[in-house]
Amino acid sequence: MLRKGDRPLTKQAYQFRLSGLNETEGHIKVDTLIRALKALVKTAENATRLAATGRSGGRGPKPRWLREALDFTITGLEPGSTTLEIEAPRLGDVSDLDIAQQDLWVQQPSVEDTSLDLGARATAEVQNSGASGDYFDGNVLQAILGFGDAAKTADVCYELIAANRSGTGFVLEASACPRIKERLHLIPAPHAFVVSGRLDEIGHGLGRFRLLIDGGSLPGRLDRNQLDVEMLRPLWGKLATVQGIVHFKSSGQPRLIEARRIDARSKGDKIFETMPQAELGGGESADVLTKSDRRPSVPMSSLRELRRVDPMVLWGAWPGDEPIERLLAELD
């Protein structure tokens, strides 16, 4: 049995129920079952990645902690029904996950939660038109849409029930998926930003940090292809300016910044001491920083155009000892 320290990897029980199928009661086609379970597992996987790291996608093999979190077991199929009994590991027992370290999570779960709980919260939230998008992003939403095609009928309803405890479940009708799909276009695209604030290290060696900005905080992580965490040691706890890609919730609020460059804050960088905000209504492709080792520079004649471009170009653009007031006056 998998263990974390001396604790056994305990599991929580669920029922996954499908109703409205075009089959004899208690029967389900194998292809339908495979697609439905695939949608359930993928939703749990992406929602767990999002809660733990701030991004639901990932390349390469799954990390060990995620494989353990997704180690579901089907323990039975109730007679005369299409209700599956499923067991899922508690996140509090999964190796390499420290639930007690709140700052290591973008959305901190309970030790009793499982990845199915996180997937259920995302599935419930995405059906709420006024939701902020704490538990889902584009990849999570795409995984949820997999339920819409699983049974090839709009009459099917999926229900996840947490058994024997006050866990999280969901009810999702396949007919709701076209409406949910429309939300894909409302999620702001990632965008390049320069942000300045006080740099707090929250996960040594993990490349995780928090940028304190004007009474708020922006979670972040280093792009390990661009930055070495050890090189940033002198900056922890000090004012710094971060260049990177900001990922947003559906509400337009920032979820996370992926840092491509971090420097000690210099004269004029105070203009970047503003929490990034996305324009709602859908975004186009993300700006990609292909020259992260080079600060963008802009001649004075171009500063009048800045109200139509990203603030990214302002960083490092101060010519000589020009006061910030004069540069801002150029924007009027």
Image (tube, rainbow, N blue to C red):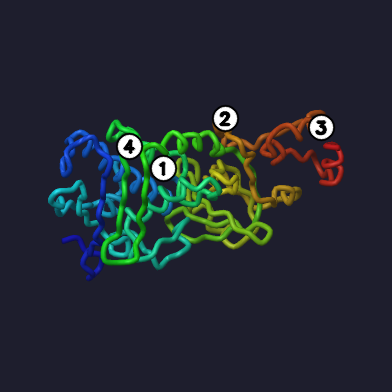
Residue 237, quarter of the rendered image: bottom right
Secondary structure found at label 4? loop
- Measure the C-alpha gap from mark 2 to mark 3: 24 Å
**Rendered residue at 60%/45% (across/down):** 252
Total number of numbered discs in the rendering: 4
**Tag 3: amino acid:** Arg
First in sequence: mark 2 or mark 3?
Answer: 2
Disc 2 marks which residue?
284
Disc 1 marks which residue?
140
Secondary structure found at label 3? helix
- Measure the C-alpha gap from mark 4 to mark 2: 34 Å
**Contact flag, marks 4 and 2 (Cβ < 8 Å):** no
Residue 286, quarter of the rendered image: top right
Q: In this view, does 78 lie to the left or right of 225?
A: left
**Contact flag, marks 1 and 3 (Cβ < 8 Å):** no
Disc 3 marks which residue?
304
Which of discs 1 and 4 lies nearer the camera? The answer is: 4
First in sequence: mark 1 or mark 3?
Answer: 1
Does 216 sit above or below residue 309?
below
**Tag 2: amino acid:** Glu
Disc 4 marks which residue?
155
**Tag 1: amino acid:** Val
* Residue 198 x, y percent position in the rendering: 63, 59
* Residue 16 x, y percent position in the rendering: 26, 50
First in sequence: mark 1 or mark 4?
Answer: 1
Q: How crowded is mark 4: few (under 14 residues within 10 Å), some or many (20 or more)?
A: some
Secondary structure found at label 1? helix
Which of discs 1 and 2 lies nearer the camera? The answer is: 1
